[in-house]
Amino acid sequence: DPKAWEEPHCFKPERFLDSTIDYKGRHFEYLPFGSGRRMCPGMPLAHRMLPLTLGALLHSFGWVLPQGVTPETIDMSEKLGISLKKSVPLSAIPMPHKG
C-alpha cells in the first residue's frame, strides 16, 4: 500500500528493523508476513534456522574488532523493540581461519 510504505513494491526488509510493533498481534503494517493465525508459514523455520546460521558464521571465521576499538570501549547498552537489541550495533570483522 503506497499510503503505508514508501516504494511498497521494492524488497526492503530494513524498513522493519526499528519498528516497535509486535508481529504476533493485529498490526497490518506487517501484512507481508501475515498476522495472528495467518502469519507466514516460513517464520517458524526462519526462527529455527537463524541460530544455526549464526553458529555456522561464528564457527567458520575468526572475529576481530575494528582498529581502535577495544573490549572496554564497546557500548553494551540495550534498547527495547520486537526483541532486546543493542543500542549501538557491534562491529566485528570476520577473518578466515588459517590452515
Image (cartoon, rainbow, N blue to C red):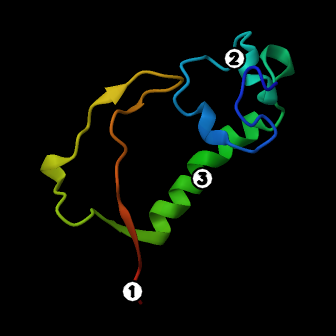
Where residue 46 sits, quadrant-wise, is top right
On the image, the x and y values in percent for residue 16 come to 61, 31
- Identify the image quadrant of the N terminus: top right
The residue furthest bottom is 99
Tell me which numbered mark, 3 or 1, is placed earlier along the sequence: 3
- Label 2, label 3: how far apart the Cα atoms are: 23 Å
Q: Mark 3 — residue?
A: 52
Q: Give the residue at x 80% y 29%.
A: 32
The quadrant in which residue 95 appears is bottom left
Residue 24 image label: 2
Tell which of 1 and 88 is nearer to you. 1
Residue 2, position in %: x, y?
Answer: 79, 26
The kind of residue tagged 1 is: Lys
Is 61 placed above or below 34 here?
below
Q: Which mark is residue 98?
A: 1
The residue at the point 86 percent across, 20 percent down is: 38
At horizontal 78% and vertical 29% (from top left) the residue drawn is 33
Q: Which residue type carries mark 2? A: Lys
Q: Which of the image's four quarters has the C terminus?
A: bottom left
Q: Residues within 10 Å of mark 2 (few under 14, many from 20)?
A: some
